[in-house]
């Protein structure tokens, strides 16, 4: 299906040159990187789709904010501005700055999981899972079954399976569950949206059992835009109103501002409980810095305050989601399987379907990421068994529900022509899919291994 490209609602003021290495140079670079895309130098990458996190282009208003940033240790102007904006947008009485999403998790999750055994989420993002485990608890995913069928259309593939959630609570005991987490959009399921109805129902279940309900809010704006497009109750609501409806249900949230708030660094914690907020402040001071800067420079806080508002601009979101839908349309025409309908921040190519001859323990999604680099200098990453890692109890390789190669699209950075290069590269790879081989790990750390592991092709 041909999807029209929605023109950029901005013009470009500043540019960065890109260089494409030769095929031979790329072969040498990826081997030197031990077949781990995180070890590639960005100067050796032509189109960088590793992540949409912190890679967006700031607006002229944000850059102006960089000059306005107040670098006072305590009580800086930008602190009050970000507080006001965050409280207005999310409707939470208490908001704490931290330097990124995982810092928010590091501060908040041990507070919620103290003396508890489990966290249950629609799906845990990888750093969220790591912080649950570091707090001594187990992370359980409970996404709707529709998410697992990448070819089936479903409006809200990010939703919590609330029937299964109730069963988990009965089996594990409400008193053992420290937090129920809703990740919006559901990154690990393919940037898939969660409906407001599902957020409300999950919050109700959590509260009936006396369990804290938290939102992992990295992509609050993209989720809200999908709700506007797909959930009848909200078709005439503004994105800002939808954000309010979502956060109304939550007791607290963690947020990486590097996604929808379009800054290169930043994060937030929000909560309603004064006693919890006191603990958050104490831990922020030890881990991050004084509460009015929370590990950030004043200039970055100013850009964040501005970005929170730009992120929910509907013209921007139409273009942003439109880019994803254009790329997905080209892939569909080319017969490339991906998580469909496409999500908010990335196209998740179904490597299990594209490379069916490579088993999960030889990491098909990682193999496809490497092939994209060899083919066109594109850097993508594995969201599959390679990222999931080993069972913490048995040390055995886990099999992920999905083997996705994620093409994350940075915000306001690449043009339609770049998206065409990406689609053409995948179509070329499909032609020779049978000849692509799997990988084995030759060195790995115990946690978050995908960032630093070393791999070799299996001959
Ligand atoms: C990016 C992200 C995080 C972690 O945030 P960082 O800023 O990278 O530390 C947590 N949860 C979700 C859903 C994310 O997308």
Image (cartoon, rainbow, N blue to C red):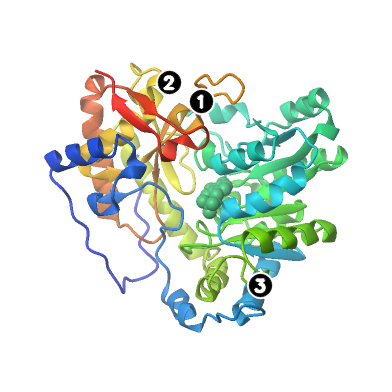
Secondary element under disc 2, as helix, strand or loop, is: helix
Note whether residue 98 is visible: yes
Q: Is mark 2 within 8 Å of ligand 1?
A: no
Left or right of 165? Residue 147 is left
The circle on residue 356 is none
Q: Give x and y (percent) for residue 132.
A: 66, 39
Q: Are marks 1 and 3 in contact (CB under 8 Å)?
A: no
Q: Which residue is mark 2?
A: 360
Secondary element under disc 1, as helix, strand or loop, is: loop
Q: Which residue is mark 1?
A: 400
Note whether residue 224 is visible: no
Mark 1 surroundings within 10 Å by alpha-carbon count, few (fewer than 14), some (14 through 19), many (20 or more): some
Reply above or below: 261 against 23.
below
Left or right of 281? Residue 42 is left
Camera-side residue: 244 or 389? 389
Reply above or below: 225 against 427.
below
Quarter the C terminus occupies: top left
Q: Give x and y (percent) for residue 161.
A: 68, 31
Secondary element under disc 3, as helix, strand or loop, is: loop
| Residue appearing at x 78%, y 60% in the figure | 277
Reply above or below: 306 against 354.
below
| Residue appearing at x 63%, y 65% in the figure | 97
Q: Give x and y (percent) for residue 282.
A: 74, 61
Nearer-N-terminus badge (2/1) = 2
Q: CA distance from mark 2 to mark 1?
A: 8 Å
The circle on residue 292 is 3
Q: Are marks 2 and 1 in contact (CB under 8 Å)?
A: yes
């Amino acid at each position: 299906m041909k999807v029209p490209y929605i023109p950029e609602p901005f013009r470009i003021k500043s540019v960065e040159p890109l260089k494409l290495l030769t095929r031979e140079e790329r072969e040498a670079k990826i081997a030197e990187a031990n077949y781990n895309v995180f070890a590639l130098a960005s100067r050796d990458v032509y189109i960088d789709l590793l992540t949409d996190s912190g890679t967006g282009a700031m607006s002229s208003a944000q850059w102006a904010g960089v000059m306005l940033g107040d670098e006072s240790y305590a009580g800086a102007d930008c602190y009050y501005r970000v507080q006001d904006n965050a409280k207005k947008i999310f409707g939470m009485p208490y908001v704490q700055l931290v330097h990124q999403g995982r810092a928010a998790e590091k501060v908040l999750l041990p507070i919620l999981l103290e003396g508890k055994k489990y966290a249950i989420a629609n799906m845990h993002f990888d750093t969220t899972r790591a912080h649950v485990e570091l707090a001594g608890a187990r992370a359980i995913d409970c996404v709707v079954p529709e998410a697992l069928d990448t070819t089936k259309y479903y409006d809200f593939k990010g939703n919590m399976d609330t029937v299964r959630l109730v069963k988990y609570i009965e089996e594990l005991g409400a008193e053992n569950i420290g937090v129920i987490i809703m990740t919006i959009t559901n990154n690990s399921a393919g940037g898939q949206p969660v409906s407001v109805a599902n957020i409300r129902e999950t919050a109700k279940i959590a509260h009936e059992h006396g369990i804290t309900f938290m939102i992992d809010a990295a992509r609050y704006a993209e989720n809200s835009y999908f709700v506007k497009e797909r959930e009848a109750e909200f078709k005439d609501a503004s994105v800002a109103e939808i954000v309010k409806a979502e956060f109304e249900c939550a007791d607290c949230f963690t947020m990486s501002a590097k996604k929808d708030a379009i800054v290169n660094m930043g994060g937030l914690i929000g909560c309603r409980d004064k006693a919890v907020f006191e603990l958050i402040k104490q831990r922020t001071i030890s881990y991050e810095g004084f509460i009015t800067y929370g590990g950030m420079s004043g200039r970055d806080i100013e850009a964040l305050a501005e970005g929170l508002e730009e992120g929910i601009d509907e013209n921007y979101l139409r273009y942003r989601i439109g880019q994803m839908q254009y790329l997905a349309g080209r892939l569909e025409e080319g017969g490339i399987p991906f998580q469909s309908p496409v999500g908010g921040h990335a196209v998740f190519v179904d490597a299990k379907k594209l490379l069916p001859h490579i088993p999960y323990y030889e990491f098909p999604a990682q193999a496809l990421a490497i092939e994209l680099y060899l083919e066109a200098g594109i850097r993508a990453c594995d969201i599959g068994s390679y990222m999931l890692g080993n069972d913490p109890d048995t040390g055995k390789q886990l099999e992920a529900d999905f083997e996705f190669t994620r093409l994350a699209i940075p915000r306001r950075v690449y043009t339609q022509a770049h998206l065409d290069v990406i689609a053409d590269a995948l179509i070329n790879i499909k032609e020779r899919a049978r000849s692509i081989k799997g990988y084995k790990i030759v060195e790995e750390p115990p946690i978050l291994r995908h960032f630093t592991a070393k791999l070799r092709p299996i001959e």
